Amino acid sequence: MSFKAAWEWVRNIFRIILYIGKGISNLPDYQAYVKHLKENHPDRTPPTEKEFFAELLENKYGANAKRC
């Protein structure tokens, strides 16, 4: 196995682990969100990844968050 093939294998394993981790943690997928915005709302500018997760956390835990 060449170095390039081994590196691709490691990258793919890492992506799978990251995908599973996001599923377990219930975090939305930023790339899927950006894709959705580009396809369905071309007039809107996608937020940066940092802005996306900051807004997510604000909505979930901020002062105006819905709680039991």
Image: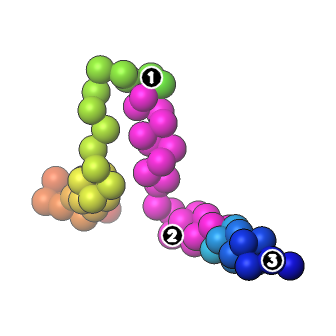
Q: Position of residue 37 (x, y in %)?
A: 40, 31
Q: CA distance from mark 3 to mark 1?
A: 42 Å
Find numbered disc 1 in the image and state the secondary structure of the residue it sits on: helix
Question: Can the viewer see residue 24?
Answer: no
Q: Nearer the viewer, residue 7 or 32?
A: 7
Query: Nearer the observer, disc 3 or disc 1?
Result: 3
Left or right side of 6 for 49:
left
Name the residue tied to disc 2: 25
The answer to which image quadrant residue 63 occupies is bottom left
Q: Residue at x 28, y 50 (%)?
A: 48
The residue wearing badge 3 is 2
Identify the magenta region.
15-38
Q: Residue farthest to the left?
A: 63
Q: How many marks?
A: 3
Name the mark nearer the viewer: 3 or 2.
Answer: 3
**Rendered position, 30 above or below 14:** above
How was this image coloured?
rainbow
Left or right: 41, with 27 as reference point: left
The residue sitting at 74% across, 79% down in the picture is: 3
Q: Amino acid at mark 3?
A: Ser
User: Tag 1: residue type?
Assistant: Asn
Dot 3 or dot 2: first in sequence order is 3
Task: Give the residue drawn at x 54%, y 66%.
Answer: 22
Give the position of the C terminus as an image quadrant.
bottom left
Q: Is residue 16 magenta?
A: yes
